[in-house]
Image (spheres, helix red, strand yellow):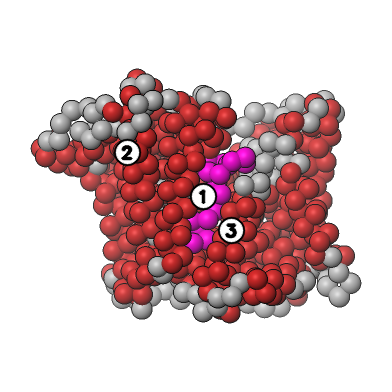
Amino acid sequence: MLIEVFVLLLALIALGVPILLVMGIVGFAGIVLTPELVPALFPQKIFAMLDNFSLLALPYFILAGELISAGGISTRLVKFSETLVNHWRSGLGHASVVSCMIFAGVSGSSVADTSAIGSIILPAMKEQGYKPGFAAALLACAGTIGAIIPPSMTMIVYGSMANVSIGSLFLGGIIPGIMVGIGLMIVIYIYSRFPAYPELRRTSGTFAFGKVMRAAISVWTALLAPILVLGGILTGAFTATEAGAVACFYGFFVGFFIYRVLKLRDLPKIFIRAAITTAMVSGILGMAGGFGWLLSFLNFNDIALSGITYIAGGKISAMLLLLGTMLLLTMFVDTLAILIVFIPVAVVIGRNFSIDEFQLGILMVMATQIGATTPPLAALLFVATSMVGCKYSETIRYCWGFIVAEVTVLLLVVFWADLASWIPHYFLG
Amino acid sequence: MVASVFRTIDRTVEYTLFLFFLAFTLVGGLQVFNRFVLGLPLSWSEEFQKFGHVWMVMLAIPVAYRRGAHLGMDVLLLLLPAGAQRTVGLVTEVLWLVLALVIGRYTLVIMQIAKTQDSAGLGIPMDWVYMGMVIGSVYIAFVALRRIATHFGWTEPAPDSLASH
């Protein structure tokens, strides 16, 4: 039965059927075809998955991102980042990474990061002669930071399915997220040493503290958002879900009272946009309630655990095997679907090998992000390629250096758990 | 005439979705304010948000479906001949209809049991909470039937723009 379930799942996904529908149909078919199960289990498991307080952080952070973005913050953020690093060689490339890192503290998604920052910085990159494929690969990989630096929709998905504190996962993503940013900047620097990239040798302007401060003042609302969210979680003042609700009110306050660009008549559209994005993720999770339960009923998690235990001798090799399998699969299948199937497996492996739950959670999130930038099927590369308007093969040519940087950070987190677990353990125990 | 009725239904559903989302965001803010500022935690706010989330997601799934927003991988599909793509498209709409029917049908079964239970925080009958899944399923089926009809000559009214002014 398990083989039939996976064959049907992969066949429908390959045919372009939406992931939500695939999860729902396969989950229901599996339940109906198992004689000892009743069909009413299916909607009951969907309800149980959606009736989860932790999952509420998802719509709140999506809405907060919409409200804050409506204030035109991304343009100011790019300007601020440029004042910080424009005097460096390939300053514009570095500015795109820094902008993505700061915007990651406002948005919770890598696609939002790539699109928001890319749309602002691309014209300048084209003007400075950046190779289109290079710009697309850089923006796609820099966007992954959006899901690693908190808040993060992927972490909310992981935390609510694996029953791990979302606030702690958020804190755990800070150091790896910054490391990915630094890693990408090192790759840009290495590229700039090659004669074939004269555009990366350019600098624009000099560093001026006054200019930085002026830009920081224009963007203080965006810089304050992550401080408010993380500060609230760090001090234990509120949970991740409550932090999301606070971020919504903050976003409204900033857009309506400070920048005065948010209009009350726009609110229904903003809320509906956020609800649609929520449905795209929470809807898949709801259907995964039935599908995941079926997999667990069919002993998939135990089979996967015994397979990994048979091959892996210890904690590190088990993590490498799990992440390696995920990275391989995400090259061909949607990353969210793979994450949802593998979360219960990761939980049993983590328990069996005594792996720190925050380290494991951050590693799983990072693996999905690397998967989203690894050809042939790489959602983020598709987004960036279509924004730049170049050939996909051109983007693929330049993405490998950045992927090496991301995998290096992933391996550092595998071998050094403290990178992901120190902050949450120190502050939240 | 039919198209304008459909458009009115679509707008009503989307506006209801907005009101749900607005209500549970306000309650989320109220929960933090009451506990953090007044020191008086609310007993019902968490349940209100959870149940509101179920309703909201079940209403937003068909809205996203109608607007073609659900995530899927169409890379391989685009390699197929146009006729095969249309067939896969039609099968997909039929699968949406099947999904709507099974969720709606079997949620009604659960509601029969749930109507005897009240929720702990709000004190409302639990079948009201499950009702959101039935209403969402009915709207999914409605959208699916319209999309199936487009394969046989029906033209769907274009969805309203969601871009801010």
The type of residue carrying mark 3 is Gly
Q: Quadrant of the C terminus of chain B?
A: top left
Q: How many marks?
A: 3
**Label 2, label 3: how many angstroms apart (C-alpha)?**
28 Å
Q: Is residue B92 magenta?
A: no
Q: Position of residue A179 (x, y in %)?
A: 35, 54
Disc 1 chain ID: A
- The residue at which mark 1 appears reads as A370
Q: Position of residue B89 (x, y in %)?
A: 78, 36
Q: Main secondary structure of the magenta part?
A: helix
Q: Nearer the viewer, mark 3 or mark 1?
A: 3
Which mark is on residue A324?
3
Q: Earlier in the sequence, mark 1 or mark 2?
A: 2
Q: Is residue B32 above or below residue B57?
A: below
Q: Which residues are drawn in magenta?
A: A362-380
Q: Are marks 2 and 3 on the same chain?
A: yes
- The residue at which mark 2 appears reads as A189
Q: Earlier in the sequence, mark 2 or mark 3?
A: 2
Q: Is residue A363 magenta?
A: yes
The residue depicted at 26 percent of the width and 26 percent of the height is A202
Q: In which quarter of the view is residue A131 placed?
A: top left
**Label 3, label 1: how many angstroms apart (C-alpha)?**
11 Å
The type of residue carrying mark 2 is Tyr
Q: Is residue A141 left or right of residue B35?
A: right
Q: Secondary structure at mark 2?
A: helix
The type of residue carrying mark 1 is Ile
Q: Is residue A9 visible?
A: yes
Q: Position of residue A358 (x, y in %)?
A: 45, 69
